[in-house]
Amino acid sequence: MTGASFNPSAEPARRTIMAAAGAAGLAAALTACGSSDDSSGSATDNSGAGSTTQDSNGSGGNSSAGGGGSALAKTTDIPEGGGTIYKDKAVVVTQPTSGTYKAFSTKCPHAGCAVSSIADGAIVCPCHGSEFAIADGSVKKGPATTGLTAADITVSGDRITLA
Ligand code: FES
């Protein structure tokens, strides 16, 4: 009888130990799940850093949209049969006939002075009196022997821009 009484009490004790080991195993498994959650959190942080690159691409597009020629004048600023000198741009814009606009460098080809006035259909250099035609910049009066250098302009509506 004595031996028989040991066996039933020993089996539940073993089951208890096994159950405790199983609980410890579950706890370890839960801890492992917790640590994997942490690693997925840091992965989210990395994707956030990627969006910063997209922002810099957007600002690059905005700056390129501002390109184009620089505004110089309005067509109404240029008298027909005459012209206007823009000293800061070193350009003279003329309107030899209605609606036709020409532009030239203000640098006189004789000795490099800047032309300073327009009179009687001619662009006049103050240094030695050379005169140039408003229609094509050619020499009308010396001592200059070559005409003014043409400048590129674009007329769009009433806006004149330097190319
Ligand atoms: Fe213009 Fe001499 S520099 S006429």
Image (cartoon, grey):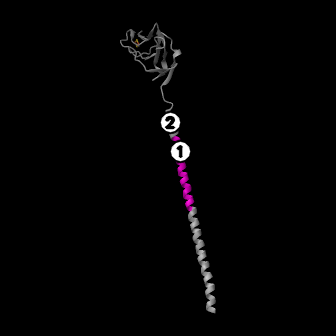
Circle 2 residues within 10 Å: few <14, some 14–19, many ≥20: few
Q: CA distance from mark 1 to mark 2?
A: 15 Å
Residue at 63%, 92% (x, y): give it: 2
Q: Quick check: which quadrant has ligand 1?
A: top left
Residue at 57%, 67% (x, y): give it: 29
Residue 35, given in percent of the width and then of the height, sits at 56, 62
Residue 89, given in percent of the width and then of the height, sits at 47, 21
Depth order, front residue of 64/83: 64
Q: Write the start and end of the magenta stretch as one range.
A: 35-56
Which quadrant of the figure contains the N terminus?
A: bottom right
Q: Amino acid at mark 1?
A: Thr
Per the image, label 2 sits on a secondary structure element best described as helix
Residue at 61%, 84% (x, y): give it: 10
Task: Find disc 1 in the rendering and name its residue.
Answer: 52
Mark found first going from the N terminus, 1 or 2: 1
Q: Amino acid at mark 2?
A: Gly
Q: Residue furthest top?
A: 120
Q: Are marks 1 and 2 in contact (CB under 8 Å)?
A: no
Q: Main secondary structure of the magenta part?
A: helix
Depth order, front residue of 128/27: 27
Task: Find disc 2 in the rendering and name its residue.
Answer: 61
Circle 1 residues within 10 Å: few <14, some 14–19, many ≥20: few
Q: Is residue 55 magenta?
A: yes
Residue at 56%, 55% (x, y): give it: 41
Per the image, label 1 sits on a secondary structure element best described as helix
Q: Residue furthest left?
A: 145
Residue 18, given in percent of the width and then of the height, sits at 59, 77
Depth order, front residue of 112/62: 62
Q: Is residue 152 magenta?
A: no
